[in-house]
Image: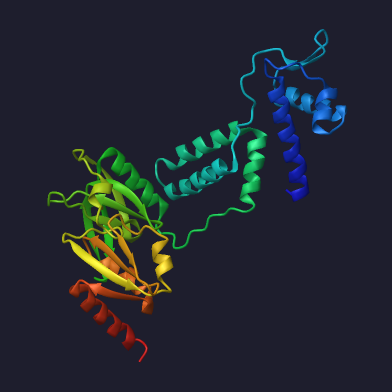
Amino acid sequence: MKSDDYSTTYSTLKRMTEIHRRLLPPSQLPTSKSLAESFGVSSKTIQRDIKFIRDVWGVPVHYNASLGGYEYYEGVIDFPAVKLNEEEIFAFLVTRNSIEKYQGTAIKDPLSKLYDKFVSQMGILASERMKKVQEYVSFRTAGWSTMDYETLEKISEACRDRKELTFTYNYPWRGKETKKRIHPIHLVNHDNAWYVFTTSEKKGIYPAFSLSRMEKVRVHTTTFPEEKFSLENYMKDSFGIFRGNETHKVKVWFDAFAAPFIRERKWNESQKVKTKKDGSLEFSITVNSLVEIKGWILNWGEHATVLEPKELVSDMKEELKKMLKQYQ
């Protein structure tokens, strides 16, 4: 839609919405002339608007000759156009984008249908507003998982019905596949990749498997007992998707270049930031594994220096030595 077309359509719909408001009791019955003068258009334009409201939207409006004005001859509570402001429309678009992350799961279709059902009830005015917002708001996601969506659907079913799963799993660092039989209890989308948490022989330990590394996935008829699991509690001190069994207090210095980028995001609930006079900062955090936070720190290159713990300082030195060899 061209901007001129949009402006014309939007102003027309906005005028119709206002006409609706003026037709609601206990207001005086408006005439095409009074409405035309109010909106700065011709009486014929108002008559076309009302005809559209009556014939296309099916709203019970007519001209009452005895009272000399237009009225609703049946009770009308609301107009067939949900009134959304741009902030609400933005939130609605975020919701639509989030639905795509459930692609392949049992709830993807119901969510999409629910969204489409709501859109169908929004009416033309709100729909036109949404189109306008989409002209300057977009969502981009990098690094989508390359998994088979059929796998996601199978595992979603297994989690829902508490059915055992078997599959072959590829551990990249081992270079070979391993056969697994698990009790899947929770699916999670982390950084646009899907993982499934399972029960284990060790109480309180719930291993996570990447769906992208699974092959030959099979859902069995054998079921297992329901087990209470809270992802939020289990991953409380994790910096990523994997959970360790030890507590590490990490402190990292970021120079003045990186400091603003660190401050502008919430990386973990336990984080503490201490800004220095020179613009740099100290970033402190408590985690239960050093694996993923080490990779995150490496991403900042020369702008980050690990201060604590000593174990992580040593790991970083060794990692940097290995990286340096790649360029010699």
For residue 31, above or below residue 64: below
Q: Position of residue 275 (x, y in %)?
A: 35, 67
Left or right, 11 with respect to 181, comes to: right
Name the residue at 50% across, 40% down: 112
Left or right, 118 with respect to 180, comes to: right
Q: Residue furthest left?
A: 202
Q: Is residue 171 visible?
A: no
Q: Position of residue 135 (x, y in %)?
A: 64, 52
Name the residue at 44% across, 59% down: 144
Left or right, 144 with respect to 64, comes to: left
Name the residue at 29% across, 43% down: 159
Q: Position of residue 290 (x, y in %)?
A: 24, 67
In this view of the protein, which residue sits in the foreground, 251 or 54? 251
For residue 18, above or below residue 77: below
In this view of the protein, which residue sits in the foreground, 11 or 168? 11
For residue 271, above or below residue 127: below
Q: Quadrant of residue 75?
A: top right
Q: Residue furthest bottom?
A: 328
Q: Quadrant of residue 13?
A: top right
Quadrant (top left, top right, bottom left, bottom right) of the C terminus: bottom left
Q: Residue furthest front?
A: 277
In this view of the protein, which residue sits in the foreground, 44 or 205? 44
Q: Quadrant of residue 88?
A: top right
Counting every numbered tag in the picture gives 0
Q: Is residue 120 visible?
A: yes
Q: Position of residue 80 (x, y in %)?
A: 64, 27
Left or right, 19 with respect to 217, comes to: right
